[in-house]
Each structure stands twice: as C-alpha cells, then as structure tokens.
Image (cartoon, rainbow, N blue to C red):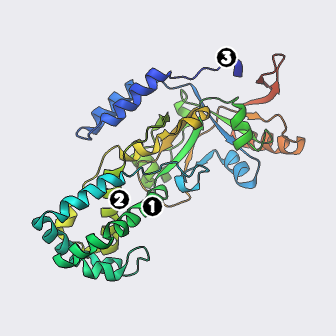
Amino acid sequence: MEAKDHKTIMNDAEMQEYWHTLSSFTGENIPEEMALLKTKIRYPRFLYRYRPINKNNLDALRTNKLYFSTASNYDDPFDTFLHIDLEKIRHEFESVSNSPEALTALANGIAVIKEAFQNCPDISQELLQQATTIEGIKQLLESGMKNQFLAYMLTLRSKIQEEILSICFSENGLNETLWLKYADRHRGFCLMYDLSDTDSFHCGKYEKCENCGAYKYGTPIYPVYYSNEPHDATDFAKLVMKQDIAQRLGDSLPEFMRKDIKPLPWEVERNSLIKKECHKYDEEWRMIANVKMNLPATIEWVPFGVIIGLRTSPADKDLILSMAKEAGIKNIYQSYIDTENMLNAYPI
C-alpha cells in the first residue's frame, strides 16, 4: 500500500464519458441503460471508509454494518443540492400570464389543492385563496406571486437531501486529507472493502433480508463526478413539488394530478453523483439506496482489512483489534510515514 503510487482509477476523459452517458439516459429501458453505464465504469479492487473512534463506529466495526445517511447529514451543504434554474421558472410564469387557457387551468388547479397547504408556513394562505380566480392570479403575478412560489421551490432542496440515502467511500486508503477530515486527524481507522469478494457482502444471504428494501431494490456503487458546471435539476424539483403536494393531499389528490406525477429515472443518481471540483481530492465513490427506507438503515459487508491511524492511541488500537477480530477481519495494517516522507501502511 503506497500513497505515492496511487493513481485515480478513472482518468478525466473516462469520468467525462461516464457522466455524459449517465446524463443522456431517458429511462425508457433502465436495465439496458444500467448495463451500458457499467461499461463506462472502471471499478477499483478496494474502496475505503474513514472513521473516527467512537462507540457507534466501533460497534459498526464489530458487527460489519455500514449505515446509510442522508445528504442533509453530510458536512457539505451542497451535497445532493438541487440546482434550480429560477430564470426558467420566471419565464414559465410569464408564459402563463399571457395565456387565458393557462390562467384558467392554474386557477382551477389551485382551487383544488389549496387545502393541502393550510399548515404550511412557507406559503401564504391569503395568496392561495386569491389565486383561485383568474383576476386574482393576474393581480398576484403583478405583485410578487412568483417570489412566493420560488421561495417554496427552494425549500424542496432540503426535502430531497433528507430523502436520498447513500454511503460514501474513497478509492484511496492513504489519502492524507481524508485521514485528517474523517478519521479524527489520524487518530481513527480506515476500513477496506474488497469489491472482488462477493462472499464478504452479506446482504441477501439471511432470512431477515427477504423484506429489506436495500436487498430487494439494490444498492449500486458509482464514482462521483467533479465539475463546477452543475446538473440542472429544475425538472426534478418540479417532480418533488408534485410529490410533496400529493403527500399532503393523500387520497383526495385529483386524478388529473396523479397522472401528471411521472417518475424521472436517474435524477436521484444525477443529483447525488456530482460535486464541485474543490472536492476532487476525496476520490469518492458512493453507494445509493434504490428505495426510501426508515433510518437507521444498514447493509452488512465484512471488510477485507482495517488500517490503524498514525496517531491512534494504544488503548484505541486495542479496541480496534478486538472489534476487528470479533468481526472476522483478517488483515490489519498500521499506517506510517515512510523513508520518502509519504503516508504508507504495513501489515501487522
């Protein structure tokens, strides 16, 4: 294990091809698209997960569990961030204001759904009532209804961040920045997962797995693409808005609105798998749950090995060794600074 020899598994050209392929999918044939996407991904043998020492992480080590998290709990507020084209939405408002047919349809639609927002603090009830008539909508468009609607749209960013479940890895187990950031400044440990060892992945191999969403719907792993050009999530935000309205209305949702709520395949992946260039040092890969689950949600995956930090205390090292032994982890490494002043690791 040598940091100086580490090279990113997929080069920039390969990453761009992978991202452009993912961005091109329409969802018309998902199995075929999934198969195509896999041809664009070069997987490393190992993925790594950095952990600080605490009770929860030691217990997860002992039981071979990995916990899914929501993007709202990640340290990056822009993780799984919906980039909404506000100018596009403003233009749509202008198109509606110039169409009598569109104004009539909008007024009728708001009259049906306004009861669903009685307890929503982000939306003015007076404005909703006024928007149930064509003249009322015209007045609102002239006096700032667009801003009220846009404010509501922007709240959907946090909603989607709270719903998408994922587990983060890195392809580099000797990444000095990640040791500092996620393993308590080299005082923690780093878990190694062998993608070539299917026996170590326990999901689906127990009777309890029969009703598990993670097993039934899958937990694919993808590389994260880094770019300062965001993915346009405007259409996805509209879908989330419609789903939010449907959830509030429940069984009273009009049939015409049910038909209008159509899934947007691959939008979860496209929003979860792109991060700004400044995070490129993470060399991140991400496992995404293909279904919503109540937390805590876990998978079981026996690590190939564990790397102990440079500054891990003797007492914490003993705890790691004890938990690793109970978990059946056979390969233990100690990180060190080698003769070329690089972070390295040797087996112990």
The residues tagged by marks 3 and 2 sit, at their Cα atoms, a distance apart of: 44 Å
Which image quarter is the N terminus in?
Answer: top right
x then y, percent, for residue 124: 37, 78
State the residue position of label 3: 5
Give whichever of discs 1 and 2 has the lower sequence position. Answer: 1
Residue drawn at x 34%, y 36% as measured from the top left: 23
Q: Which residue is mark 2?
A: 240
Asked whether disc 3 touches disc 2, contact meaning CB atoms under 8 Å apart, the reply is no
Apparent side of residue 268 relative to residue 30 in the rendered image (left or right): right
Q: Which residue is mark 1?
A: 159
Q: Position of residue 348 (x, y in %)?
A: 81, 27
Cβ atoms under marks 1 and 2 closer than 8 Å: yes
Whole-number angstrom distance, CA of label 1 to CA of label 3:
41 Å
* Residue displayed at 23% across by 60% down: 94
Task: Rate crowding at label 1 as few (under 14), some (14 to 19) or many (20 or more) other CA atoms within 10 Å.
Answer: some
SS for dot 1: helix
Query: Dot 2 lies on which element?
Result: helix
Q: Position of residue 98 (x, y in %)?
A: 15, 63
User: Element at badge 3?
Assistant: helix
Residue 2 visible at all: no
Lower position in the chain sequence, tag 3 or tag 2: 3
Taking the view exactly as shown, the residue that stands out farthest to the right is 314
